[in-house]
Amino acid sequence: MLNVAVLMGRLVADPELRHTANDISVTSFTLAVDRSYVKAGADRQVDFIDVVAWRSTADFVCKYFRKGQLVAVQGSIQTRSYTDKDGNKRKAFEVVADNVHFAESKRDSAAASGNYHSRADVSADQPAPAYASGDTGDFEEMPSDDDLPF
């Protein structure tokens, strides 16, 4: 049998850490995942997929991820049945995350969540960072070694 789910999408809300009665960390979050195709003359459709993470994965997600960030999740699909408050039988589908990864650069992530400030937002009094300010005297010439194995 094979049950593997790999998703990449944006978090629709900040994940919140909870604990079970046995003090096990857990978090649930939803990813907005674009469909890979677009019907002619229509907008791209988005699926909202529920994900649950346990223990150290839950701690990691809650510590480092925020609403709007692009996230990659690897896990498995799980179903559960329950009865809602009106007495109706329901079935829930969710991805149980084994691994959660950053799927964009830190700069892109900040821009997606609205925290990025462009260079124009920075005060004109601040000079641009100087990366070429080192002195060549800071480096030592290495002798040629022709017998290196690579």
Image (cartoon, rainbow, N blue to C red):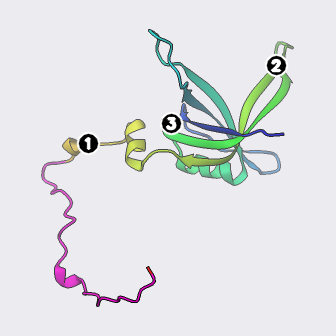
Residue name at image x 37 percent, y 41 percent:
115
Q: Residue 55: x, y in percent?
A: 72, 51
Q: Amino acid at mark 3?
A: Lys
Position of 145 relative to 87 (above/below): below
Name the residue tied to disc 3. 67
Residue 19 shown left or right of residue 16 in the figure: right
- Tag count: 3
Q: Earlier in the sequence, mark 3 or mark 1?
A: 3
Q: Main secondary structure of the magenta part?
A: loop
Position of 3 relative to 24 (above/below): above
Name the residue tied to disc 1. 118
Q: Secondary structure at mark 2?
A: strand
Mark 3 burial class by Cα count in 10 Å: few <14, some 14-19, many 20+: some
Q: Which residues are magenta?
A: 123-149
Residue 124 is covered by the magenta coloring: yes
In whole angstroms, how far apart are the C-alphas of marks 2 and 3? 28 Å
Residue 123 shown left or right of residue 144 in the figure: left
Name the residue tied to disc 2. 90
Residue name at image x 19 percent, y 63 percent:
130
Q: Earlier in the sequence, mark 2 or mark 3?
A: 3
Q: Secondary structure at mark 1?
A: loop
Residue name at image x 67 percent, y 36 percent:
51
Q: Amino acid at mark 1?
A: Ser
Mark 1 burial class by Cα count in 10 Å: few <14, some 14-19, many 20+: few
Q: Residue 27: x, y in percent?
A: 68, 41
Residue 46 is covered by the magenta coloring: no
Q: Amino acid at mark 2?
A: Arg
The quarter in which the C terminus is drawn is: bottom left
Residue name at image x 26 percent, y 42 percent:
118
Q: Secondary structure at mark 3?
A: loop
Position of 145 relative to 115 (above/below): below
